[in-house]
Image (tube, coloured by chain):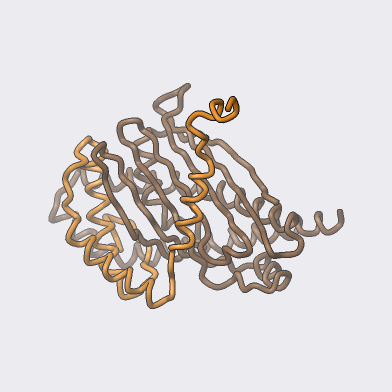
Chain colours: A orange, B brown
Amino acid sequence: MLHFGWISMNSLGAECTPLKWEYDKCFNHWFRENYLKGDTKSDPCAEIFQKYQTCVKNAMKDQGMDLTELEASILGTDKEKQTPANPKVSKDE
Amino acid sequence: MVWISSDKHVFSHSWEKVVEAALRKYPNPESPNVIGTDIIDRQIDKDGKLYSKRIISSIWSNAYTDFISKLIGLDVTKIVHAVEFSVVDPKQKVYQLTSQNYNFMDYIVVSEKLTYTPDKIDPSSTLLKQEWHVTCKNLSFTSYLENAMGTTMKTAAIRGRQGIEFVIAQVKEEVEKIASLDAVKEMQTIATNTLQEFSNIHQNMEDIGKNWEENLHEELNNFIKKNVQQ
C-alpha cells in the first residue's frame, strides 16, 4: 500500500490486508498530526479499527493462535519483578 | 540457563520523529524476514498513553536456521510469530516495547526490550536502550544455542536500527511532499508513479534481502565454525 510513496505490511490473514492498510494509513496520519501534537482524545480511526480487528481475530482463530499462555508468562514476569512493599518488616518479624 | 545482553544507540533525530518511524518500522529493507504485522489491541488511557499489542510474522529460513532445525529437530524455518507490547508516553517522552516469540515457547524464549527516550546529553537526539534475554529449555546444547541465538538477535538489532533510519527518511520525504502539496497534481503523479515505484521498492528490497542473507550466512558460518572448534 502506498502512502505517498511508501508501503504497509500485510496482515497474517490475507483477507484482512486491505482493512489493515486502510487502518494503518488512518492511524499514521492521526499519530503524526494529532497524537504527537497533544491531541490524544480524538479517535478518527475507530470504525475501520473495529472492522480490521474482527477480521484479524477470526484469522488468528483459523490459524489456531491463542495468546493466553504467552500473555500469562509476560504478566507473570512483571509480577516476579515487583519487590515486596516493605521487605524489612517481614524480616524483623 | 539464560543468555542476557544489552546495547545502546543514539539516533540524531528528535524523539517524536524516531517514535513515528519506529511505529512504522516495517517494512524496511533491513528486515526482509518480516512478512506481516498486525495490531491486535490498542488503547489510550486517561493520561494519553498509547498501549498497543502487535503480532509480527517472520520467516527465518537461512543456512543457519536450517542447521538449527536439523540439530534440535524443530522446524524453525516456517512462519514464526512474535508478540510485542508497547507503550507510548507522550508526556514523559518514553516509548517502550517488549517482545517475545510465540512459537516454540516450550523450547526457547527470546525476549527483547526496547526503550526510546530523549538523550540526556543532547535532548534533540534519541537514546535507544536494548536488552535481550534468551532462555532454552528441554533441549540439548542449551548454552550453545542461547549464545548462538543471542548473537543472531544482536546482528538483527543493528540492522533494525538502520531500518529505523531508513523509515525516518521515508517519513520526512512524505511530510515534505504533503507540505508542498498541489493536491490534484500530487494525486496524478502518485497514480502514474505507483506501479513503477512499487516494482522498484520490491526489487530493492529483494536485492538488499539477498545481501543481508548472504552476509548473515557468512557471519553465522564463521561463528559456528569457531564454536565447534572450541
* Relative side of B85 to B187, left or right: right
Quarter-of-image position of residue B124: top left
Q: Is residue B210 left or right of residue A15?
A: right
**Which residue, as the protein is rendered here, is positioned at the far top?**
B121
Rendering coords of residue B33 (x, y %): 52, 63
Residue B164 x/y as whole percent: 44, 46
Image mark count: 0
One can see residue A7 in this view: no
Q: Name the residue at 36% across, 67% down.
A: A11
Seen from the viewer's position, the closer of residues B18 and A40 is: A40
Residue under the point 67% across and 48% down: B3
Q: Which residue, as the protein is rendered here, is positioned at the far bottom?
A: A62
Residue drawn 19% across the image and 56% down it: A46
* Residue A15: % across, % down: 31, 75
Query: As displayed, is residue A38 above or below residue B137?
Result: above
Q: Nearest the camera: A68 or B117?
A: A68
Toward the viewer: A76 or B220? A76
Q: Residue furthest front?
A: A93
Query: Seen in the image, is B180 located left or right of residue A1?
Result: left
* Depth check, front residue: A42 or B163: A42
| Residue drawn 48% across the image and 62% down it | A69
x, y (%) of residue B202?
Answer: 43, 65
Q: Is residue A31 visible?
A: yes
Which residue lies most toward the left here?
B184
